[in-house]
Structures are given as structure tokens and as C-alpha cells.
């Protein structure tokens, strides 16, 4: 009798971790289909949450290599900016609009007024204006216009997800939850997230680190090839106490024009033989934008 009782107690204790872990992330919550579905639902809600939000950005650029070398161009540049985050439902696009206020510690004068522009113009017009203005601060000959920290989340949007192959790579239990790493590869075809200016699709691949159950995203890495340039983008997310949501805290970019490649993309200056550029942005002081924004 005592032996049977002890056996039941041991069995009960052995089941306890399963029950406790089940409350956090049941086994089926870590399956590939469950993780991708949860992440897609999370991104759909995140589109509403990370809208009309400002953050301070510290953005550092560095030319790692350049052939032929432009002696008149500095090797390193540091920008201080405000960044306006939003999701525009009319165009189904993420926007991260930079308002550069200082370059290498020197305040800029006579710059566009982001707040006034957002009061009077739709965000997509503001984004176009500021992208043209901010392009003058980009180091190197490689032109880039899709360097937005939230861009890669669109892989999980209904427009693109059906044309993506997902694979579960690993499951990791941490103190802050159960995190699943899922790799993705876009399928060849017209439905890619990024396109060259010629209209040719640019296939992307990468990884999401997703919390089982909630679909919350901790990290996204994405790589794509545009013309002769390979772009490697990584965004890290962390909780923000003021907003009560997870926000981008760092965004790392690496661009490499392949040596001796024939550069046909009009965004790449034709005299470039090879070049590598690395950029790192960090974001702090998140807050809601306090004036009405024209969203259409």
C-alpha cells in the first residue's frame, strides 16, 4: 500500500513540470504551424500598436571596404535622429521616417520639419520627402531605400506569407518564455517583399525568433539580393515599459556589392566595383506622437 502511494506521488511530481510548462507553452504551441499562425496574428495586432510612435535613434555607418576608394568620402558617420514609426493601412506598408537632427555631433539647420509635415501630409508623402532628404547622409555608393527595422515583419503578412516556406529550427526554454526559431525562404515568383526598381522580384530568406503561444517576436534576420548587392538586416525587439509593447531596440545592416559584378541596378552607381557598408541603429525614448496624423 505504502509502495503504491509513493509510486503515485512520484508519478504526480513527474507530471507537474509538464502541467506547469503546458500553462506557458503547450507542446502543440511549439509546432511549426502554431508558431507561424501565432506570429502572423501578433504582427497583425502590432500594426495597430506600433503606429504614431516616436523614438530617438543613434545611427552609425561605416565603410568596411571600397574599390575604387573614394578618398573624399569619410569612412565613418554618426547620425542623431527622431524616427516616426507607423503602419499605413492604405498601402499596407510599415514606415520608419527619419528626421535627422545632427551629423557627427553637429546640429543641422534649415532641415524639414517632421512634425509639421505629419500634420499636413499623408505619411507616404512624408516618407518620400524625408527619404530623398536623408539619402544625402548615406555613406558609400550603395543606395538603399528599404532599410527600415520593421520591414521584415511583412513576411508574415497575408500578402506574402502564402508564398513563403517556413521551417522550424529549434525550441529554447528561457526564464522569459519558450522561444522557437523559424527559418523562412520566399518562393521564386512575383510575390516577393522586395523588388528591384526594374520590377524584378528579389527573393529574401532569414529567421524569426518567436515566443510560443503569444507569437511575440524577439529577433528577425533577413537577407536579400538586389542587383549586385547582398543586403543583410537584423532587428532585435525588447519590451518597453512606457508603451507596454515590444519595440525595435537595435537594427543592424550590412550591404556588400560583390567584387567585379556587373551592376545593373539603377540605384547603384556604375563606377563601383566592390563595396561593403555596415550600419547599426539603436532606439530609445519611445513615446506616442501627440498630434493628429493624416492616415490614408
Image (cartoon, helix red, strand yellow):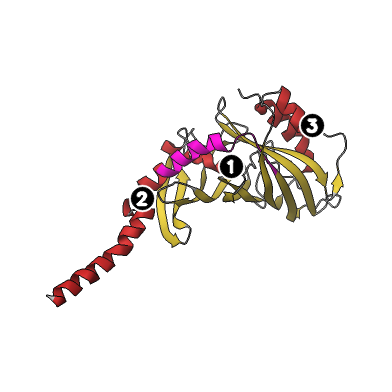
Q: Nearer the viewer, residue 119 or 65?
A: 119
**Disc 2 and disc 3 in contact, CB within 8 angstroms:** no
Kindly identify the residue that appears in the image at 79 percent across and 43 percent down.
Answer: 137
Residue lying furthest left: 1
Quadrant into which the C terminus falls: top right
Q: Nearer the viewer, residue 207 or 15?
A: 15
Residue 214, position in %: x, y?
43, 47
Q: Is residue 223 visible?
A: yes
How far apart, in angstroms, are the residues tagged by discs 1 and 2?
25 Å
Q: Secondary structure at mark 2?
A: helix
How far apart, in angstroms, are the residues tagged by discs 1 and 3?
23 Å
Tally the marks.
3
> Mark 3 or mark 2, which is nearer the start of the sequence?
2
Vertical order, 165 against 66 (above or below): above
| Within-10-Å neighbours for mark 1: few <14, some 14–19, many 20+ | many
Horizontally, residue 24 falls left or right of residue 234, namely left
| Mark 2, residue position | 29
Kindly identify the residue that appears in the image at 31 percent across and 58 percent down.
Answer: 19
**Secondary structure, magenta segment, majority class:** helix
| Mark 1, residue position | 150
- Choose mark 1 or mark 2, whichever is in front: 2
Residue 120, position in %: x, y?
72, 22
- Residue 113's label in the rendered image is 3
> Mark 2 or mark 1, which is nearer the start of the sequence?
2
> Which residues fall within the magenta stretch?
38-55
Q: Secondary structure at mark 3?
A: loop
How far apart, in angstroms, are the residues tagged by discs 2 and 3?
46 Å
Residue 163, position in %: x, y?
43, 37
Amino acid at each position: 500500500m505504502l509502495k503504491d502511494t509513493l509510486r503515485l506521488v512520484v508519478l504526480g511530481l513527474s507530471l507537474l513540470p509538464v502541467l506547469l510548462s503546458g500553462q506557458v507553452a503547450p507542446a502543440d504551441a511549439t509546432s511549426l504551424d502554431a508558431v507561424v499562425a501565432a506570429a502572423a496574428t501578433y504582427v497583425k495586432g502590432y500594426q495597430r500598436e506600433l503606429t504614431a510612435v516616436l523614438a530617438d535613434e543613434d545611427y552609425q555607418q561605416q565603410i568596411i571596404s571600397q574599390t575604387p576608394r573614394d578618398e573624399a568620402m569619410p569612412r565613418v558617420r554618426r547620425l542623431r535622429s527622431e524616427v516616426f514609426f507607423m503602419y499605413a493601412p492604405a498601402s499596407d506598408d510599415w514606415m520608419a521616417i527619419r528626421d535627422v537632427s545632427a551629423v557627427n555631433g553637429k546640429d543641422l539647420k534649415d532641415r524639414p520639419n517632421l512634425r509639421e509635415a505629419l500634420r499636413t501630409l499623408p505619411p507616404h508623402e512624408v516618407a518620400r520627402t524625408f527619404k530623398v532628404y536623408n539619402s544625402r547622409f548615406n555613406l558609400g555608393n550603395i543606395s538603399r531605400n528599404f532599410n527600415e527595422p520593421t520591414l521584415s515583419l511583412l513576411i508574415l503578412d497575408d500578402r506574402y506569407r502564402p508564398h513563403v516556406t517556413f521551417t522550424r529550427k529549434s525550441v529554447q526554454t528561457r526564464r522569459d518564455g519558450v522561444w522557437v526559431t523559424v527559418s523562412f525562404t520566399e518562393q521564386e515568383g512575383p510575390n516577393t517583399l522586395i523588388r528591384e526598381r526594374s520590377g524584378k522580384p528579389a527573393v529574401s530568406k532569414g529567421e524569426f525568433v518567436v515566443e510560443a503561444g503569444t507569437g511575440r517576436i524577439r529577433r528577425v534576420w533577413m537577407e536579400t539580393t538586389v542587383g549586385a548587392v547582398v543586403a543583410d538586416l537584423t532587428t532585435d525587439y525588447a519590451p518597453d515599459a512606457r508603451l507596454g509593447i515590444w519595440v525595435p531596440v537595435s537594427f543592424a545592416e550590412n550591404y556588400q556589392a560583390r567584387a567585379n559584378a556587373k551592376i545593373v541596378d539603377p540605384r547603384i552607381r556604375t563606377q563601383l566595383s566592390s563595396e561593403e557598408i555596415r550600419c547599426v541603429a539603436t532606439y530609445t525614448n519611445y513615446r506616442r506622437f501627440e498630434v493628429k496624423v493624416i492616415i490614408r
